[in-house]
Amino acid sequence: MTAKTRLRLLLCIPAIALIFVFMVLPITNMVEMSFRTPGTTDPFGDDYTLMHYTRILGDGYYWSVLARSLLTAALVTVLCLCVSFPIAWHLSRARGLKAVLLYAAIVSPLMTGVLVRNFGWMIVTALNGPLNETLMALGIIERPLRLLFTQGLVVLALVHVFVPFMVLPINNALRNIPESLGEASASMGASRMQVFRDVILPLSFPGIQPGMILVYVLAVAAYVTPALLGGQMVSVMPTLIIGELTGTFQWPFGSALAITLSISTVIVVVTFTMLTWKLMERAKA
């Protein structure tokens, strides 16, 4: 083994140790906990069982909550893509002070805590909040709308939180597309829509794919926003899991719910990745 190889292995040790301590060990412990029997005086017993997974698979309620969580994350991802692509396009074409200001406007929300933003949504959408009062003053509605503790508000707030995570990778991909490609296509008679469909969109897939995966994973695991803005009216898997772990102290069942959500998310992400790879291969061909 050469000195260069030994140096590379030595430099890998901190990263491997970090992944092992903060990722491999917690996941292994959670998997092992999901097979534990319920405890009487402790959060878990000494024996092992499949009863928690049997309970999840045999109860339609947990299936419906899981489906709602996955579909909500998918909707948030699609809406983030629709909002982020135009922003990323203008950002990729901006130069100088305009680019700096756009970057600041996109990144600045990340400097505000999620709790603060959610409390802001709670104030704005309350029955006597400024949104309802403005709509009533304009004569658009006759009585206040119940916006708080609804699925729609949860989706809107999650889009607000995760748009920057979609804009930045798409912007990076769009910046790598030479402007001359669009100009050459237009000079050959292609319309703006054709240029976007046949040139810009396929070449932006390397940014769209990681952006959508990142937003989807973050949205499906979001807890604070659904808990505050959805309350008891909007049940998703993260709030259900936290309720089992901290509310009833059913650690084995809560771990089984977490493993079920993780496996479902991995299946969706792998399927999406394979499909987008095929689309990118077709675009290259």
Image (spheres, grey):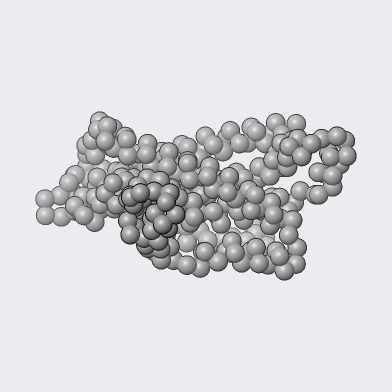
Name the residue at 49% across, 55% down: 160
In the picture, which quadrant includes the C terminus?
Answer: top right
State left or right for residue 254 relative to residue 129. left
Label total for image:
0
- Residue 67 figure quarter: top left
State left or right for residue 78 relative to residue 28. right
Q: Position of residue 124 (x, y in %)?
A: 40, 60
Name the residue at 40% across, 46% down: 152
In the picture, which quadrant includes the N terminus?
Answer: bottom right
Question: In the picture shown, does residue 226 fall above or below 100?
Answer: above
State left or right for residue 140 relative to residue 94. left
Instruction: Say which of 1 and 24 sits in front.
Output: 24
Residue 199: tell me if it is visible: no
Q: Position of residue 90 (x, y in %)?
A: 69, 54
Instruction: Say which of 148 and 64 sits in front.
Output: 148
Instruction: Say which of 203 and 179 sits in front.
Output: 179
Instruction: Say which of 204 and 80 sits in front.
Output: 80
Q: Position of residue 146 (x, y in %)?
A: 33, 49
Residue reaching furthest right?
A: 187
Residue reaching furthest left?
A: 40
State left or right for residue 39 relative to residue 142. left
- Residue 191 figure quarter: top right
Q: Position of residue 114 (x, y in %)?
A: 42, 62
Residue 81: tell me if it is visible: yes
Name the residue at 39% across, 54% down: 136
Name the residue at 39% across, 48% down: 141
